[in-house]
Amino acid sequence: QTSRSVQACRHNAARRCSLPPEAALDALRRRQGESSHLAALLAAPWLEEAIADDRVRRLFARDSRSVRKDCSEAWAAAERVRTLLRSLGMPADGEGAALLDVCSGKGMTALVLSFEFPRARVHMLDANGEMELSHVRARPNLDFVQCDLFSRDAAAALAACRADAAACVAVGMHLCGALSPRLLTLAARSPAVDAVVVCPCCLKGSLKERVRAEARRDGREHYAVLVDTLASLARDECGDGGGRVSVEWDGEMLSPRNALVSLCA
């Protein structure tokens, strides 16, 4: 049985968005001073045309605070992907690259990546097959793959998304609990993935007690310890001293959970 998300990606039909395009833009403009990422998104040459499409605008027709947060995270991801593609020797427009938005949710990050890297192939991967994803049809270089990151087929799904691409970058933004270490481990062990960037969210899963204990012992904030723990895990997976692992704190993301852990081949 085909999931609702996949069906929405295959058909152009979508409910009309009641939010006018100018209202969607104004909601972002009024708060662009909160983040340089919002300001950069608003300056993107493709944004007005994108929001004119009902299918795309539905992503912006939500709680304004949530939209601003998602937009700032999506732009942060795009900037990090830009750096990783450059380090991999790939063209600035993403030609020849496969970009994976893992645990994508409805895919604000994937949408921004599809515009910022128009020659790349962008794949949304998420376990939820019941999302309304008609906006995927608005982008010729974007698709959706239903994938549970903890399934036995997850590594094969990542490899299939790469296909014959010259390079593959995986992104996991605002990943909850065990999803962050899972994606880092999968990407580090997969020959199909050349680089991965993860922004962890909450303290759950297998690392929870370890992080709590270390935070208590050292008098540190839980999230900072979580980020260091994930970076250490990535270095261990590299097996070469961890020189390919970096941590960047991005204060322009409209969330206190704003660390980006990257691993690049």
Image (cartoon, grey):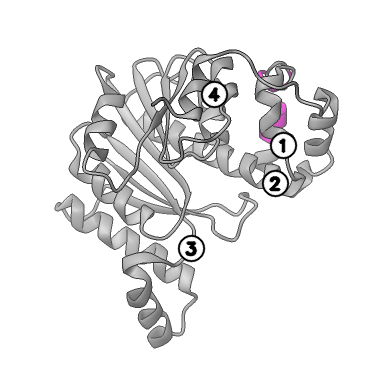
Q: Amino acid at mark 3?
A: Cys
Q: Mark 1 or mark 3: which comes first in sequence?
A: 1
- The residue lying toward the viewer, choosing from 238 and 173, is 173
**Do labels 1 and 3 touch, CB within 8 Å?**
no
Q: Mark 3 or mark 2: which comes first in sequence?
A: 2
Which residue is the site of mark 3?
202
> For this view, does 161 lie left or right of residue 68?
left
Q: Nearer the viewer, mark 1 or mark 3?
A: 3
Rate crowding at label 1 as few (under 14), some (14 to 19) or many (20 or more) other CA atoms within 10 Å. Answer: some
Which residue, as the protein is rendered here, is positioned at the far left?
A: 239
Rate crowding at label 3 as few (under 14), some (14 to 19) or many (20 or more) other CA atoms within 10 Å. Answer: some
In x, y percent, where is residue 219?
A: 46, 85
Q: Amino acid at mark 1?
A: Ala
Rate crowding at label 4 as few (under 14), some (14 to 19) or many (20 or more) other CA atoms within 10 Å. Answer: many
Which residue is the site of mark 4?
116
Secondary structure state at the residue bearing disc 4:
helix
Q: Identify the mark at residue 35; answer none if there is no mark.
A: 2
Whether the magenta-drawn stretch holds residue 200 is answered as no
Q: Mark 3 or mark 4: which comes first in sequence?
A: 4
User: What span is colored magenta in the figure?
Assistant: 40-48
**Do labels 3 and 2 touch, CB within 8 Å?**
no
- The residue lying toward the viewer, choosing from 48 and 85, is 48
Which residue is the site of mark 1?
39
